[in-house]
Every structure is written in structure tokens, then in C-alpha cells.
Amino acid sequence: MTINSSSIVSSLGAGSGIDIKSLAESLIEAERKPFKDRIDQKVQKSEAKISGYGAILSYLRPLRASMEKLANPESFGSLAVSSSQPAALTAVAQSGASVGSHSVSVLSLASPQLSRSAGFESTTQSIADGPFKLELKQGNGQPRLIDVSTATPQAIVDAVNQDATANSTGISAQLVRVNTKGVSQYVIEVQGPKGNDQAFTLAIDSSTYLSSQNPPAQPPVLQKDFLAEAADARVMVDGQLITRPTNSITGAISNVTLELNGVTSSPAKISLTRDVQVAKDNINALVSSYNDFVEALKELGNSKSEVETLGGSLAGDGLLQTVRNQIRSALQLSDRDNASVNAISSMGISVGLDGRMTIKSDRVLTQRLTENFDQVVRLFTSSPASTSKKGLAGDTLAAIDVLMPKYGKGRIQNQIDASTKEVTRYKDQLIQLETRLAKSLERYMSQFSIMQSMVGDSNNVRAGLKNSLGFNSNQ
């Protein structure tokens, strides 16, 4: 609506009864509309950008989650290990183990020495008049004397166990009640660690024992019977004999621990197979999250998008193009040192002209994960061709962290904050506009009231003149 001074005068000149309030409000609205429309458009544009940046963040999160899995070598799936004779032999694969099968024969298990003393009437039987010492010799070590302060079988057991704790001998002693030919007695059983080198001798030191006797007597025999001899485990692995002082065998098969439980009846087969489905699932998750991300950026940047609210909200925005380029660049990493898997295209995965990622050949992907597993893992996790030395997944995560770090603010959040400040500034301008227009309305009302009063006075004067001069409406 366009209102000028001549129209106002013309309206006021029409006589009394003019609605000056409506007239003033019309003038204010005519002044408000162009300013408010411009500011509202700016607010809408900034708010649309905020929503668009938020959409980028929401699509970057699942992409980061899929990349975090592929940045970890463990997420490509562990080896499945099986044994043809699990009752006698099992195996556990560690990181770095390779697919394959091995022939393993368990010839004998590692065992500890177990000896038994002569019998005692009770655990507190006095066997000397005073304290004495024990002599212990373990493997090729030097004999060591152990103090026994109280001359009882229980004190001997306690002394041996205390010495084992203090010196980490691995030897343990206990009192056991036995029945021999109808006679109930207590014997001291002493057991050492497994392995040939862990054989031991334990006896009462005769010199300290005899000096405590009155009259002298021979000390009790602490190793009267040998129930088991110390022995190494003997295992034939792929035709090679291996001995170990333990039944947990490492080093026989690279990065595999063999757990021996018994002797095998024939060579057992240890099979290590790769479950590639875990890696395939993680790669498929990457493809899905990346394509969702690409499609979202496409709609956000398309000014003709038919997607409500967010479509075209970032059309022509420079940050949108930066995000797209940085992520795509990270995914184009290649590793020239890998003979068979030097890029994602080597795994049957392609990126089309529209930017979408496609697994064009599931057969090729399965083959690469089966036959070139280490190279696939290296491409994603530790490619030397990568500047950051973190591989394709690591480089993509680094690019995402610049845009959207886990802690603190990145480029996208900074842009959201800047746009939020713009909205606040525009709304402040609207408040200022309304304040100014309110003052203008007061001014208009005051001016129009004065003008209306003047017109009323003028009309009254004109009417008085007519009456005085005798004019009437018919003349």
C-alpha cells in the first residue's frame, strides 16, 4: 500500500469522521513490510543453514562409527580354531595368526614332582627337642636351608610354604591323612612345578636336627615315596618334536597357543579358518553409511531439491563442498606396496560419477578377504602410503575429526554457531524496527490529530460564514 501526503490531505479535507488511527497504522505497515520481509528471509536462510549443518553432523556420525570399526584390525574378525581331538588338545589363536592346518601329536604331558614323607601320628607330633632346618635343592640351583621353629609336621609344612612364597619356588606342601594297612597316619605331600628342570630334593638337615636331640635320633624321611616325577610335555608339531615344561605351548605354531589336556590317540588336526563375514558386514556398513552421507549432501546442495525443509538449504555453501571433497579424498587412498589390494577398487568396490559407493563384486571381496586378508587390513589400518600412517579408515577419521571432533568444536559446529549468531542479530534488528515504528506511530497519531483539529476548525469557520452571509444549500 502506497500512501503520500497529498492523499492524506485529501482524506482529511473530506471532513470530520476520518479514522486517523487506521490511517496511521496503514502508513506504519507500509513502512514495516519491506524491512521485515527482508529480515525474515535472512532469518529463514540462516535457520535453514543451521538445520543443514546439523544434517551433515547426523550423517557423519554413522560414517565415523563404521570407519572406527575398520580402523581396528580386530574388527576384521578373528580366526576360528578347531581341534579334531578337543578332549586331548585345544588351541587359541592370537593376533597375527595365519589361516592353515597343522598336525599335532601329544606324546606326554608336563607333570610336577610329587613326593610323600614317612608317616606321623598327628599333625602336632613332636619330632625333635628343638628347632632345626630343612635343606631344599631345586633343579640346578644351590641347596638352601629353611628354618623350622617348632618341631612338628605342621611346622614343616608351614616352613616350606612360607619359603615358596618368599622365593617364588612354586613348591607347595600339605598334610594328608592316609590309611596304610589299617593304620591311620599323616604324611607330608610336597609338589613342585611342572618340567624336568623343576625336580627337587627336600630333607631335614641332619646336623641341625641331631644337635637338637637328646639323645640323638635319625630325622624323619620327608621324601620316602615318589608319586610322580617332574617331566616336560612332549609334542610333535608338523613333524617336529617340541618339549616344554608346561602344558600351555607357545611358539610351536606362530601366534597360536596349544593347550594340552591329554595324550592324543593319533595325530590331531588343528585348523585355523577365517570367518570373513564379520569383515564383509563391516565393509557393507561402511558402504551404506557413506552412500547415505553422499545422498544427504546432494539434497542439501540442490537448490531444486524436492525434499521438504532441508532440501537445498546449503545450496552454494562452500563448507558443503569442503566436506564432500575431504571425505572423498580420504577414501581414494592407495597403497602401492600392496601387490593385490592397493585401493578399495581392488576389493570389487567402486565409486561412481554420482559419488555413491558400490560393491560390484561380492566374489572379489570374499576372495580378497580370504586370500589377501593381511593386505586388506593393512589398507584400512596402516598403509605406509598414508600421510598419517593410519590407513584409509584412519585418514577418513582424521578428516571427520577436523569437521566434527569427538571433543570440542569442529568446522561444522563453528559454522552452526556463526549462523546462530546471525539469527540472533536479525531478530534484534526486528525488535529495533518495531521500536522505531512504534515511535513513528505515535508521531503520526499526534500529527494527524492536529491536522484533523485544524480541518474541524476550518469547517466550523466555513459554516459560520455561510450562516452569517445567509447562504443556504439551495443557493
Image (spheres, grey):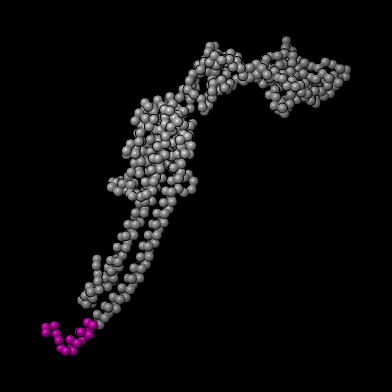
What is the number of callouts on the image? 0
Locate residue 302, reporting x and y percent: 31, 46
* Outermost residue toward the top in this view: 181
Residue 147 included in the magenta stretch of the image: no
Provide the major secondary structure of the magenta segment: helix
Give how far across and how far down residue 339 sits, in percent.
43, 28
The image shows residue 330 at horizontal and vertical percentages of 42, 39
Q: Residue most toward the front?
A: 336
The structure residue drawn at horizontal position 14% and vertical position 85%, both measured from the top left corner, is 472
Which residue does the image show at 35% across and 71% down from the upper left? 439
Q: Position of residue 185 (x, y in %)?
A: 74, 16
Start and end of the magenta stretch?
458-475
Identified at 35% across, 36% down, the residue is: 351
Q: Residue 187: tell me if it is visible.
A: no
Above or below for 447 versus 81? below
Instruction: Answer above or below: position of 171 versus 31.
Output: above
Give 52 or 398, whichever is nearer the viewer: 398
